[in-house]
Image (cartoon, grey):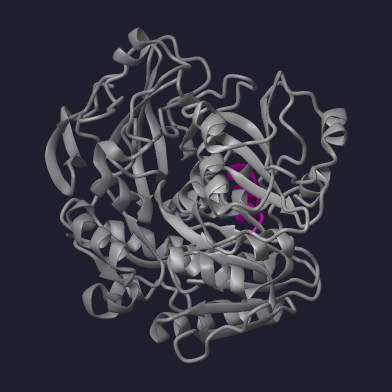
Amino acid sequence: MTDLPATAHAIQFTGPGVLVHNEAKPVPSPGPTQVLLKVEATGLCFSDTKLLHAWTGHPRKGPVLSGLSAEVLAEIPSYTPGEIPGTPGHECCARIVAVGSAVEHHAVGERVLVQTDYRHLPTAGSNAAFGYTFEGGLAEYVLLDERVILEPTTGERFLIPVGEAPSGSAVALLEPWACVEKSYANDERRTLLPGGRLLVAVEPGAPLAGISTLLAAATPREIVRLDPVDAASLGRLAGGRFDDIVYAGASADRIEALIELLAPGGVIDIVLGGRRVDRDAAVDVGRIHYDPIRITGTAGTSAAEGYARIPADGELREGDTVAIVGAAGPMGFMHTVRAATVGLRDLRVAAIDIDDARLAHLADVAGPIAAANGVEATFTNSRVSPPPNGAYSYVGVMVPAPALVVQAVAMAAPGARINLFAGFAVGTRALLDLNVVVGQGLYLFGTSGSEIRDMRAVLGRLEAGRLDTNISVDAVCGLEGVAAALAAVEARSSGGKIVVYPALHDLGLVRLSELADRFPAVAAKLRDGTWTAEAEAALLAEPH
């Protein structure tokens, strides 16, 4: 610890839209339960731009409500909720350089992948996370606390040890790849929530069966029944939260009001009973992504049919025809490569975007990967060739635009899964034809962040040589280049990920395509234009 500097460079968000490059941020000495990391590399994410602009309105910048006491949180200097300036960056590779006297599960010298999502520490709108509620990786050093970074039910570490072979960039980019993995591996709930709250709302004269079947599979602790439901009875429930809602009827007004009553992770089962919803419903797709709520249902009369059609997970299936909308962006790139390498038979993948240059880059990288794995892949500008309606059994939406959710529903074949991967802000509503969603058995779902198991899954592929996360690197920079890099991320002008090296204080944004002119010795270490561990070492050795 005596070799640590007193101060170091860090990026801080200090208010809405305000980014500061702090050149003398104090480096804290770890307290008894704390761990100090020296950051090797951090990837940038569109979520960083959302935090920058939303600031205290971001659901992960709010204070921790439970899981740790206020007294414990006050002992952690890197806990920065609300208005407190904080360091962003949640895609991080680092090394442990100091630990406190009571630290039991971490050791100096360990190289680690940082799992960022603290689901055991809820905030009002989400949960705490590294790079949001707690300081993140856009700094030379960052402090963590062992009381935060151990999963309480299993004791698993949120700092996952990694070997020395992969580059810092390859390790850091496992985080977004793990978020992609989570969206497919996520366990979907197919029954009522045991011990939860169930609301049954029935329109006058609407047929409803199957409740006894649902109750036989799982028992809620409370059942509220509104039969018949009307505006007055529903109004008395305002502010309440239900884990499951069964609605027999076809009123869009009623459906919108009922969705507001869903608790995080809640399911609404719409039983149309042969009726048609009277208009398109304004559905909060941000809640589908972040909370995550789910909509299911049936055109028939049995509520059990709605739950029966919920898939076990969000995975692709053999024979799927997959459309990835916004495929040429950084996350769409990962979804495309994952589809090409998942190993399922008879997959066809349509990578759809509106930027010809980025599509060409995606085709150059992902096209040969798909061909080598026997996956038919096409790369299409939707402004030139609009995607056909009803043609896809799986649709991934990578851009947080409500119109694209509406388009995804139109593109979906009966029984399709629609993966709302884009980080729609809570409160973002899309006008959806629920007659199509329910009648054709479409399933809209979304996930946010990842879990330790997802991190371990993609780390295993990296270490086994089955995944090279560096194929998604488009540009690199030091801390001085972060402002320009975030602007590029927000403008979606980057065809891949941008990796920040905090040790390079003054390096601006450099795209890999510019390396030959700017840093020819680094460019010589690329492999067919792809970032490598050798290129990273050469960049870090360059005078800047």
Query: Which residue appears at 59% of the width and 64% of the height?
Result: 433
Query: Which residue appears at 16% of the width and 47% of the height?
Result: 19
Which image quadrant: the C terminus?
bottom left
Task: Work out whether residue 511 can be spotted.
Answer: yes
Indicate the position of residue 180 as horizontal and vertical percent values.
56, 55
In this view, the residue in front, 311 or 284, is 284
Please identify the residue farthest to the bottom as the structure is shown: 384
Number of labelled discs?
0
Range covered by the magenta-colored residues: 455-465
Indicate the position of residue 241 as horizontal and vertical percent values.
55, 28
Prevailing SS of the magenta stretch: helix
Indicate the position of residue 316 as horizontal and vertical percent values.
72, 62
Which image quadrant: the N terminus?
top left
In this view, the residue in front, 21 or 448, is 448
In this view, the residue in front, 200 or 483, is 200
Relative height, residue 366 to residue 118 (above, below): below
Quarter of the image for residue 221 reads top right
Task: Work out whether residue 471 can be spotted.
Answer: no
Q: Along the horizontal axis of the image, is 272 left or right of 496?
A: right
Q: Is residue 134 magenta?
A: no
Q: Along the horizontal axis of the image, is 418 left or right of 307?
A: left
Q: Is residue 459 magenta?
A: yes
Relative height, residue 106 to residue 23 (above, below): above
Quarter of the image for residue 254 reads top right
Relative height, residue 89 to residue 381 (above, below): above
Query: Which residue appears at 24% of the width and 28% of the height?
Result: 4
Q: Along the horizontal axis of the image, is 33 left or right of 218?
A: left
In this view, the residue in front, 141 or 362, is 362
Query: Which residue appears at 68% of the width and 54% of the height?
Result: 314
